[in-house]
Image: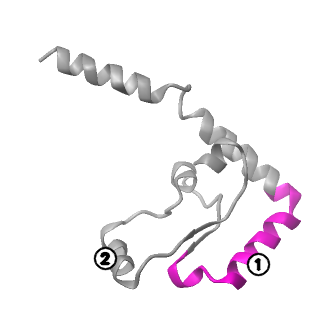
Amino acid sequence: MECAWFGVPTIALYKTSWTNYQIGKRMVTVKYLAMPNLLANEELFPEFIQDAATPDNLARAAMQLLGDASRRETVKRKLAKIVSTLGSPGASGRAAKAILRLLNNR
């Protein structure tokens, strides 16, 4: 999300132990793992999961991203749109106040 916040196109990779991966892929049923992709409901950040996260795949994706200025601009524009839907800064303060209101109403 930090890359999305600052409008930086990037590549996401996820690797874990074989056991954790086997458990996780059965429990998590989302189309994407990267939060910006989930929020956009499309793959803005290429995702490489487990065995797909190879040096060759990552290098290829990075070179494609670096070599395509129009794609980078499209991703930046879509990231800005996602960030604008998140609301203004201060979410943790607003959440804390909402929790206090709930507790005080008990």
- Callout 2 amino acid: Ile
- Callout 1 amino acid: Arg
Q: Residue at x 57, y 50 (%)?
A: 40
Quadrant location of residue 53? bottom right
**How far is disc 2 from disc 1 in space, using C-alphas?**
29 Å
Q: Are marks 2 and 1 in contact (CB under 8 Å)?
A: no
Q: Residue at x 27, y 24 (%)?
A: 99
Residue 60 circle label: 1
Q: Residue at x 45, y 76 (%)?
A: 16
Quadrant location of residue 102? top left
Residue range in magenta is 49-71
Q: Position of residue 39 (x, y in %)?
A: 53, 48
Q: Count the marks.
A: 2
- Disc 2 crowd rating (10 Å Cα; few below 14, some 14-19, many 20+) is few
Q: Position of residue 75 (x, y in %)?
A: 73, 52
Q: Nearer the viewer, residue 60 or 42?
A: 60
User: Dominant secondary structure of the magenta stretch?
Assistant: helix
Q: Nearer the viewer, residue 16 or 73?
A: 16
Q: Residue at x 72, y 55 (%)?
A: 9
Q: Secondary structure at mark 2?
A: helix
Q: Seen in the image, is 7 located left or right of residue 23?
A: right
Q: Which residue is mark 2?
A: 23
Residue 104 circle label: none
How is the protein colored in the picture? Answer: one colour
Q: Seen in the image, is 45 located left or right of residue 92?
A: right
